[in-house]
């Protein structure tokens, strides 16, 4: 699993927390910040997923012995 996927998931969770706190307190700025952070997390998670797929495809095409990144 790529580190961007982990960071993206963490940002999504933190964004949800911020958004909920903003709704609960009536703070529209905090709620908007939460929505933004959640969206950034989704993009980062998707980017990490794409990197994973490319790494897997490369390992299949080249072979695991020749592709050092497939072991990581």
Image (cartoon, grey):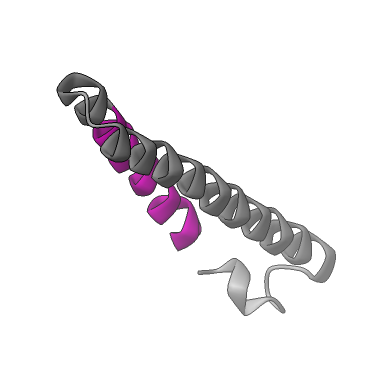
Choose between 35 and 14: the one closer to the eye: 35
Q: Is residue 70 left or right of residue 3?
A: right
Toward the left, the furthest residue is 25
| x and y, in percent, of residue 3 in the image | 44, 61
Secondary structure character of the magenta stretch overall: helix
35 in relation to 20, above or below: below
Is 62 contained in the magenta span?
no
The reply to whether the magenta stretch includes residue 18 is yes
Does residue 13 appear anywhere in the picture?
no
Left or right: residue 69 versus residue 27 is right
Q: How many numbered marks, from 0 up?
A: 0
3, 35: nearer the viewer: 35
Residue at image position (24%, 30%) is: 22
Which residue corresponds to the image point at 60% horizontal and 74% vertical from the top-left?
69
- Does 12 sit above or below residue 4? above
- Residue shown at the point (28%, 42%) measured from the top left: 14
The answer to which quarter of the image holds residue 9 is top left
Rendering coords of residue 27 (x, y %) = 23, 31
Q: Who's the residue at 27% across and 39% down the image?
A: 30
Query: In this orientation, does residue 45 appear?
Result: yes
Q: Position of residue 2 (x, y in %)?
A: 50, 59
**Within the image, what quadrant is residue 15 found in?**
top left
- Give the answer, above or below, for where 15 lies relative to 46: above
Q: Residue furthest right?
A: 61
- Judge by depth and name the residue closer to the eye, 66 or 54: 54
Residue 38 point in image, percent of width and height: 43, 40
Segment colored magenta: 1-19
């Amino acid at each position: 699993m790529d580190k961007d996927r982990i960071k993206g998931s963490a940002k999504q969770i933190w964004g949800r927390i911020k958004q909920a706190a903003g709704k609960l307190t009536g703070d529209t700025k905090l709620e908007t910040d939460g929505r933004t952070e959640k969206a950034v997390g989704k993009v980062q998670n998707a980017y990490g997923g794409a990197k994973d797929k490319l790494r897997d495809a490369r390992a299949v095409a080249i072979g695991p012995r020749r592709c050092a990144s497939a072991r990581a």
